[in-house]
Amino acid sequence: MKRKIVHIDDEKCTGCGLCVTPCAEGAIEIVNGKARVLREELCDGAGVCLNVCPTGALTIEEREAPAFDPAAAAANLAAKRNKGEAPRCVRCGAGEGEAVLLFARHRGESTWVCTRCLPVLIHG
């Protein structure tokens, strides 16, 4: 099946890891110093990770790839949660089971913030 999916240019990737945090499905990880889409069926192709890459190594391309698997993405996120790697609010520490999390930039970092803390981050 042809679909839109994240492509990572090895030449441009510095392995900084900034693209890992915004990937809600956990499809991107750093392997041997470079960002990799580990399992294509976990990538939803939304491209939230694109804008945080300082070198422009990430793009969306249309190519042959397995269909996005929401169940596999949820299982992957659950496994990360069990290892303490799932997204948590930068301010209060709430996880997805406790609050709705949104991807945000805070103090120059890519992070997650819950909807309860977002107004405080915006307005102080």
Image (tube, rainbow, N blue to C red):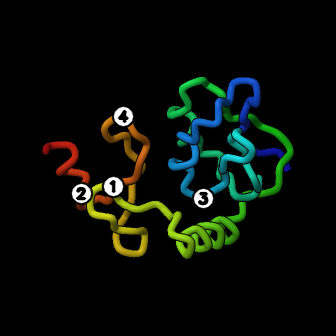
At 69% from the left edge and 24% from the top edge, which residue is drawn? 12
Nearer-N-terminus badge (3/4): 3
| Helix, strand or loop under label 2 | loop
Q: CA distance from mark 2 to mark 3?
A: 22 Å
Mark closer to the observer (3, 4): 4
Provide the residue designation for mark 2.
Answer: 117
- How many C-alpha atoms fall within 10 Å of the one at disc 1: few (<14), some, or many (≥20)? some
Q: Are marks 2 and 3 in contact (CB under 8 Å)?
A: no
State the mark number for residue 25.
3
Q: Amino acid at mark 3?
A: Glu
Q: Name which of mark 3 and mark 1 comes first in the sequence.
A: 3
Q: Residue at 85% of width from left, 50% of height from top?
A: 1
What is the spatial separation of the Cα atoms under label 2 and label 1, in whole angstroms?
Answer: 9 Å
Q: Is residue 11 above or below residue 74?
A: above
Image marks 2 and 1: residues in contact by CB distance under 8 Å: yes
| Residue appearing at x 86%, y 45% in the figure | 64
Q: Which residue is mark 1?
A: 90
